[in-house]
Protein backbone atom coordinates (compact mmCIF):
# COMPACT_ATOMS: atom_id res chain seq x y z
CA UNK A 1 0.00 0.00 0.00
CA UNK A 2 1.06 3.59 -0.59
CA UNK A 3 1.20 4.91 2.98
CA UNK A 4 0.46 8.41 1.73
CA UNK A 5 -3.13 7.42 1.01
CA UNK A 6 -3.71 6.63 4.70
CA UNK A 7 -3.46 10.27 5.70
CA UNK A 8 -4.04 11.87 2.31
CA UNK A 9 -7.06 9.88 1.17
CA UNK A 10 -10.74 10.48 1.84
CA UNK A 11 -10.70 9.47 5.51
CA UNK A 12 -8.73 10.77 8.44
CA UNK A 13 -9.23 9.04 11.74
CA UNK A 14 -13.03 8.76 11.99
CA UNK A 15 -13.68 11.95 10.04
CA UNK A 16 -14.93 11.72 6.46
CA UNK A 17 -13.16 14.28 4.27
CA UNK A 18 -14.98 16.27 1.65
CA UNK A 19 -13.57 16.19 -1.89
CA UNK A 20 -12.29 19.74 -1.36
CA UNK A 21 -10.49 18.75 1.85
CA UNK A 22 -9.01 15.70 0.17
CA UNK A 23 -7.69 17.76 -2.75
CA UNK A 24 -6.21 20.32 -0.37
CA UNK A 25 -4.32 17.62 1.52
CA UNK A 26 -2.96 16.09 -1.68
CA UNK A 27 -1.84 19.52 -2.87
CA UNK A 28 0.15 19.91 0.36
CA UNK A 29 1.75 16.48 -0.10
CA UNK A 30 2.66 17.34 -3.69
CA UNK A 31 4.28 20.60 -2.54
CA UNK A 32 6.38 18.65 -0.01
CA UNK A 33 7.52 16.14 -2.64
CA UNK A 34 8.36 18.98 -5.04
CA UNK A 35 10.49 20.62 -2.35
CA UNK A 36 12.54 17.45 -1.89
CA UNK A 37 12.86 16.98 -5.64
CA UNK A 38 14.15 20.51 -5.98
CA UNK A 39 16.93 19.68 -3.50
CA UNK A 40 18.38 17.28 -6.09
CA UNK A 41 18.27 19.99 -8.75
CA UNK A 42 20.00 22.49 -6.47
CA UNK A 43 22.60 19.92 -5.47
CA UNK A 44 23.54 19.14 -9.07
CA UNK A 45 24.07 22.86 -9.69
CA UNK A 46 26.13 23.31 -6.48
CA UNK A 47 23.58 25.74 -5.05
CA UNK A 48 24.07 24.71 -1.43
CA UNK A 49 23.39 28.13 0.04
CA UNK A 50 20.07 28.34 -1.84
CA UNK A 51 18.96 25.17 -0.08
CA UNK A 52 19.41 26.97 3.24
CA UNK A 53 17.94 30.25 2.04
CA UNK A 54 14.83 28.86 0.36
CA UNK A 55 14.03 25.52 1.96
CA UNK A 56 14.75 25.74 5.68
CA UNK A 57 12.44 27.08 8.38
CA UNK A 58 13.59 30.40 9.81
CA UNK A 59 11.16 30.87 12.71
CA UNK A 60 11.50 27.52 14.47
CA UNK A 61 14.27 27.60 17.09
CA UNK A 62 15.04 23.87 17.20
CA UNK A 63 15.98 23.23 13.58
CA UNK A 64 18.48 20.38 13.13
CA UNK A 65 20.52 18.85 10.32
CA UNK A 66 21.78 15.39 11.23
CA UNK A 67 24.41 13.02 9.86
CA UNK A 68 25.95 9.75 11.06
CA UNK A 69 28.40 11.64 13.30
CA UNK A 70 26.12 14.24 14.87
CA UNK A 71 23.79 17.19 14.42
CA UNK A 72 24.08 20.78 13.33
CA UNK A 73 21.59 22.46 15.64
CA UNK A 74 20.26 25.99 15.17
CA UNK A 75 20.32 28.51 12.35
CA UNK A 76 23.95 29.53 12.85
CA UNK A 77 25.27 25.98 12.69
CA UNK A 78 23.10 24.88 9.76
CA UNK A 79 23.69 27.99 7.67
CA UNK A 80 27.39 27.60 8.48
CA UNK A 81 27.31 24.05 7.10
CA UNK A 82 25.82 25.17 3.78
CA UNK A 83 28.11 28.20 3.59
CA UNK A 84 31.15 25.97 4.14
CA UNK A 85 29.93 23.60 1.44
CA UNK A 86 29.71 26.51 -1.02
CA UNK A 87 33.16 27.77 0.03
CA UNK A 88 34.64 24.31 -0.51
CA UNK A 89 33.18 24.19 -4.00
CA UNK A 90 34.67 27.61 -4.75
CA UNK A 91 38.08 26.39 -3.56
CA UNK A 92 37.79 23.27 -5.68
CA UNK A 93 36.95 25.40 -8.70
CA UNK A 94 39.93 27.71 -8.07
CA UNK A 95 42.27 24.73 -7.76
CA UNK A 96 40.89 23.06 -10.89
CA UNK A 97 41.23 26.30 -12.83
CA UNK A 98 44.85 26.74 -11.73
CA UNK A 99 45.69 23.12 -12.52
CA UNK A 100 44.19 23.32 -16.02
CA UNK A 101 45.10 26.79 -17.35
CA UNK A 102 44.77 25.82 -21.01
CA UNK A 103 41.22 24.54 -20.61
CA UNK A 104 39.97 27.52 -18.60
CA UNK A 105 41.94 30.38 -20.12
CA UNK A 106 40.02 33.64 -19.89
CA UNK A 107 37.33 32.15 -17.64
CA UNK A 108 36.53 33.44 -14.16
CA UNK A 109 35.86 31.19 -11.19
CA UNK A 110 32.23 32.31 -11.26
CA UNK A 111 31.87 31.27 -14.90
CA UNK A 112 33.20 27.75 -14.27
CA UNK A 113 31.88 27.35 -10.71
CA UNK A 114 31.49 23.66 -9.90
CA UNK A 115 33.69 22.44 -12.75
CA UNK A 116 34.06 18.66 -12.50
CA UNK A 117 31.24 18.31 -9.94
CA UNK A 118 28.33 15.94 -10.53
CA UNK A 119 26.49 15.37 -7.27
CA UNK A 120 23.31 13.46 -8.08
CA UNK A 121 21.13 12.54 -5.10
CA UNK A 122 18.31 10.26 -6.29
CA UNK A 123 15.45 9.84 -3.81
CA UNK A 124 13.34 6.67 -3.88
CA UNK A 125 10.50 4.97 -1.96
CA UNK A 126 8.73 8.16 -0.75
CA UNK A 127 6.59 7.89 2.39
CA UNK A 128 4.90 11.19 3.29
CA UNK A 129 2.46 11.73 6.14
CA UNK A 130 0.63 15.03 6.57
CA UNK A 131 -0.59 15.80 10.10
CA UNK A 132 -4.32 16.09 10.59
CA UNK A 133 -3.87 19.71 11.66
CA UNK A 134 -1.76 20.34 8.48
CA UNK A 135 0.83 22.32 10.44
CA UNK A 136 3.58 19.70 10.12
CA UNK A 137 4.41 16.69 7.97
CA UNK A 138 6.91 13.84 7.94
CA UNK A 139 8.72 12.22 5.03
CA UNK A 140 11.15 9.36 4.55
CA UNK A 141 13.16 8.55 1.43
CA UNK A 142 15.98 6.22 0.51
CA UNK A 143 18.70 7.99 -1.45
CA UNK A 144 21.25 6.57 -3.87
CA UNK A 145 23.80 9.29 -4.39
CA UNK A 146 26.63 9.46 -6.89
CA UNK A 147 29.03 12.20 -5.82
CA UNK A 148 31.82 13.11 -8.23
CA UNK A 149 34.13 15.94 -7.20
CA UNK A 150 37.74 17.03 -7.02
CA UNK A 151 39.70 16.37 -3.86
CA UNK A 152 43.42 16.27 -3.10
CA UNK A 153 43.74 13.11 -5.25
CA UNK A 154 42.15 14.67 -8.32
CA UNK A 155 38.71 13.68 -9.59
CA UNK A 156 36.99 10.94 -7.60
CA UNK A 157 33.51 9.41 -7.44
CA UNK A 158 31.84 8.09 -4.29
CA UNK A 159 28.64 6.11 -3.88
CA UNK A 160 26.61 7.25 -0.87
CA UNK A 161 23.38 5.43 -0.01
CA UNK A 162 21.11 5.83 2.96
CA UNK A 163 17.91 7.16 4.52
CA UNK A 164 16.75 10.76 4.58
CA UNK A 165 14.05 11.59 7.11
CA UNK A 166 12.53 15.07 7.28
CA UNK A 167 10.10 16.83 9.58
CA UNK A 168 8.42 19.68 7.71
CA UNK A 169 6.71 22.71 9.19
CA UNK A 170 4.22 25.05 7.52
CA UNK A 171 5.71 28.53 7.78
CA UNK A 172 4.32 31.70 6.20
CA UNK A 173 2.19 29.78 3.72
CA UNK A 174 4.90 27.36 2.53
CA UNK A 175 6.40 24.05 3.59
CA UNK A 176 9.90 24.26 5.05
CA UNK A 177 12.46 21.81 6.40
CA UNK A 178 12.39 21.69 10.19
CA UNK A 179 14.50 18.63 11.05
CA UNK A 180 16.51 16.61 8.51
CA UNK A 181 18.54 13.46 9.09
CA UNK A 182 20.85 11.79 6.57
CA UNK A 183 21.40 8.27 7.91
CA UNK A 184 24.06 7.01 5.53
CA UNK A 185 24.44 3.25 5.02
CA UNK A 186 27.19 3.23 2.40
CA UNK A 187 30.01 5.58 1.48
CA UNK A 188 32.59 3.99 -0.79
CA UNK A 189 34.78 5.05 -3.68
CA UNK A 190 33.77 3.86 -7.14
CA UNK A 191 35.82 0.86 -8.20
CA UNK A 192 36.18 -0.47 -4.66
CA UNK A 193 34.13 -2.96 -2.63
CA UNK A 194 31.59 -2.20 0.09
CA UNK A 195 33.30 -4.48 2.59
CA UNK A 196 37.02 -3.80 2.38
CA UNK A 197 38.56 -0.44 3.19
CA UNK A 198 39.84 1.17 0.01
CA UNK A 199 43.53 1.85 -0.41
CA UNK A 200 44.24 5.62 -0.29
CA UNK A 201 44.95 7.33 -3.59
CA UNK A 202 48.12 9.39 -3.97
CA UNK A 203 47.84 13.13 -3.34
CA UNK A 204 48.41 15.22 -6.45
CA UNK A 205 50.41 18.40 -5.69
CA UNK A 206 48.23 20.60 -7.89
CA UNK A 207 45.14 19.61 -5.88
CA UNK A 208 46.71 19.34 -2.41
CA UNK A 209 45.21 22.66 -1.20
CA UNK A 210 41.77 21.07 -1.10
CA UNK A 211 42.89 18.86 1.80
CA UNK A 212 43.60 21.95 3.92
CA UNK A 213 39.96 23.05 3.94
CA UNK A 214 38.42 22.69 7.40
CA UNK A 215 34.74 21.77 7.27
CA UNK A 216 32.79 22.65 10.43
CA UNK A 217 32.03 19.68 12.66
CA UNK A 218 28.49 19.12 14.04
CA UNK A 219 27.93 21.28 17.11
CA UNK A 220 26.12 18.31 18.71
CA UNK A 221 28.52 15.41 18.07
CA UNK A 222 27.01 11.96 18.55
CA UNK A 223 27.11 8.43 17.17
CA UNK A 224 23.80 8.77 15.35
CA UNK A 225 24.00 5.95 12.79
CA UNK A 226 26.54 3.30 11.92
CA UNK A 227 27.77 2.82 8.38
CA UNK A 228 27.07 -0.60 6.98
CA UNK A 229 29.60 -3.37 7.49
CA UNK A 230 29.25 -7.13 7.22
CA UNK A 231 28.51 -7.50 10.97
CA UNK A 232 26.29 -4.45 11.51
CA UNK A 233 22.99 -5.09 13.24
CA UNK A 234 19.84 -4.30 11.28
CA UNK A 235 18.41 -1.37 13.24
CA UNK A 236 15.05 0.40 12.85
CA UNK A 237 16.30 3.90 12.14
CA UNK A 238 15.43 6.66 11.40
CA UNK A 239 11.82 5.45 11.63
CA UNK A 240 8.84 5.19 9.27
CA UNK A 241 6.25 8.01 9.34
CA UNK A 242 2.80 6.94 10.53
CA UNK A 243 -0.48 8.88 10.41
CA UNK A 244 -0.69 11.42 13.24
CA UNK A 245 -2.90 14.26 14.43
CA UNK A 246 -0.33 16.86 15.52
CA UNK A 247 3.41 16.80 16.05
CA UNK A 248 2.97 16.03 19.74
CA UNK A 249 1.66 12.63 18.66
CA UNK A 250 4.69 11.49 16.65
CA UNK A 251 8.46 11.09 16.86
CA UNK A 252 11.06 13.56 15.60
CA UNK A 253 13.87 13.33 13.09
CA UNK A 254 15.64 15.98 15.15
CA UNK A 255 16.88 16.05 18.72
Image (spheres, rainbow, N blue to C red):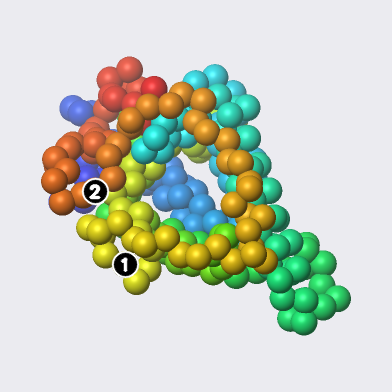
Quarter-wise, where is residue 58 in the image?
A: top right
Between 191 and 173, the one lying in front of the other is 191
Secondary structure beneath label 1:
loop
Q: Quadrant of residue 196?
A: bottom left
Q: Is residue 93 left or right of residue 255?
A: right
Task: Say whether residue 194 is visible.
Answer: yes
Q: Quadrant of residue 251?
A: top left
Could one spot residue 24 in this view of the protein?
no
- The tag earlier along the polypeptide, 2 or 1, is 1
Q: Residue at x 70, y 55 (%)?
A: 90
Residue at far bottom of view: 102
Q: Which residue is found at the position 27% from the left and 40% from the top?
A: 226
Helix, strand or loop at mark 2: loop
Up-down relation of residue 147 to residue 73 (above or below):
below
- Residue for badge 2: 228
Residue depicted at x 77% and y 76%: 101
CB within 8 Å, label 2 to label 1: no
- Left or right: where 3 falls relative to 20: left
Relative image position of residue 43 (x, y in whole percent): 54, 56
Q: Residues within 10 Å of mark 1 (few under 14, many from 20)?
A: few
**Quick one: quadrant of the C terminus?**
top left
Q: Which residue is mark 1?
A: 192
Amino acid sequence: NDLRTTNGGNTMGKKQLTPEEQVTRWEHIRAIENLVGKMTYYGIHCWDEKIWEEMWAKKAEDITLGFNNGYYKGAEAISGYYKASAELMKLRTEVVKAANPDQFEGKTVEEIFGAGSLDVNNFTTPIVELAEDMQTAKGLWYFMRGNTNYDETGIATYHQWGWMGIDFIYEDGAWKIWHLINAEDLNFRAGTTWVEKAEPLPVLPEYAAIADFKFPEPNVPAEVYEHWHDRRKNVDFPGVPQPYASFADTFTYGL
